[in-house]
Amino acid sequence: MVDSQLKEKVSFSRDTLDVYGDAHPKALLRCIVEDGDHLKSLESQHIFSSDQFSKDTLLQLFRLAAKYESNPERFSTPLKGKILISAFYEPSTRTRLSFESAWHRLGGDIMSITDRATTGIAKGESLGDVAEMFNNYGDCVVLRDSSENSVQEMMDSLRIPIINAGNGIDEHPTQALADLYTIYKWRPELLERSGKKIKVGIIGVPNKMRTVRSLLKLFSFFPEVFEEIVIIHDGSSNLIFDDNQREQLESRGLKLTLTTKFSAVLPELDVVYINAIAWVGNDYESFGESFVLNDQSPLKKDAIVLHPLARGDELDASLDETPHNWYFAQARGAVFLRMALLTCMCQRMERVMDVI
Ligand code: CP
């Protein structure tokens, strides 16, 4: 590499405000009246599914996340002395590191396991017994496991809270929380009666992708916000939804439609959520490989693109430098959202409510 190229590379900007999608979270604070009582239910719950929340709990969680995000220099250390057991038995960049970043920012300590073969599980130890030990070693568990049942198996023996950080094709509730938090930061007025409804396109498979399954459940707490949710699929499978999945969402007031006409529907969408992989068993499967978003895609001028990441060819890097890129903000905001959730689950709300 010649010197001038290297010089250009070693100089970088720390200014995150240059990054697209960095809406000011203070706008969200103005749209949600504080009522911390709704967060108390989180003190005595494991987080397994998006179904567990209530609309009020979600709004207050977003408010607390926005408070953290608005005051990055004013964090107290409410989790000082607390220990997180971070157990990720499946690859993860964002979820593990953002949970660990959130916990560190709140002043706690972490024990991290990234391979179940380094625990007694490799010797046949039951998840129940491992959970019993976790009770003695930590104050909260975050678990990613490709088995759909592991979180529930551990819940039976745990006396400390556990958070499902992705269980096979089933759910990924905290990803969905981060996704919806991003949408409300983008358009806080959606939370006011006067806000215009939005049309969301989901390029993904609701019965195979845990992020999509959990997000649709969260959407269903706010049917008044969504004009329509369009599921864009490639027509290769008739099984887009599990039994009752669509019916349940529609019974809660969501208007769901399906299409294979990707290019035709794109110009109508306010939010485009794209994902192309699902973690199935010990490997991933790709879906909708013919769908690619890039800077030439016919997106509405002010449409935003979300992606849970990791991305493949479906999300071209040419979109990164456009105002449609809210997927990096989505990943960034997840730290603050997880800080809010962890603070509540570890019964340390009173230490932050008056401080931040
Ligand atoms: N969104 C998400 O779950 O990313 P990771 O797999 O990197 O954790």
Image (tube, helix red, strand yellow):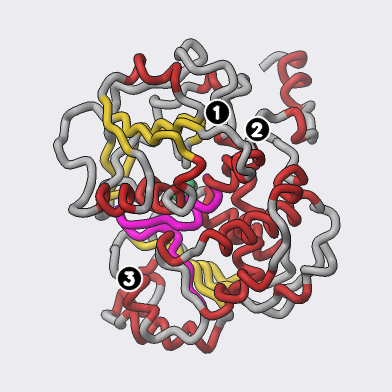
Magenta span includes 241: no
| 225 relative position to 292: left or right | right
Q: Is residue 100 above or below residue 315?
A: below
Mark 2 or mark 3, which has the lower sequence index? 2
Quick check: is the Cβ at mark 1 less than 8 Å away from ligand 1? no
What residue do we see at 26% from left, 80% from top?
124
**In the depicted view, which residue is nearer to us: 302 or 295?**
302
Give residue 258's position: percent from left, percent from top. 27, 31
Measuring 50% from the left and 63% from the top, which residue is drawn there? 54
Mark 2, residue position: 21
Of 229 and 109, the residue lying toward us: 229
Q: Magenta part of the protein: which range?
A: 161-179
Question: Would you name the residue on which mark 1 appears?
Answer: 304
Q: Quadrant of residue 33?
A: bottom right
Disc 2 beta carbon < 8 A from ligand 1? Answer: no
Q: Is residue 68 visible?
A: yes
Q: Real-space Cα distance between discs 1 and 2? A: 8 Å
Residue type indicated by callout 3: Ser
Residue pointed to by mark 3: 150
Q: Which mark is residue 40?
A: none
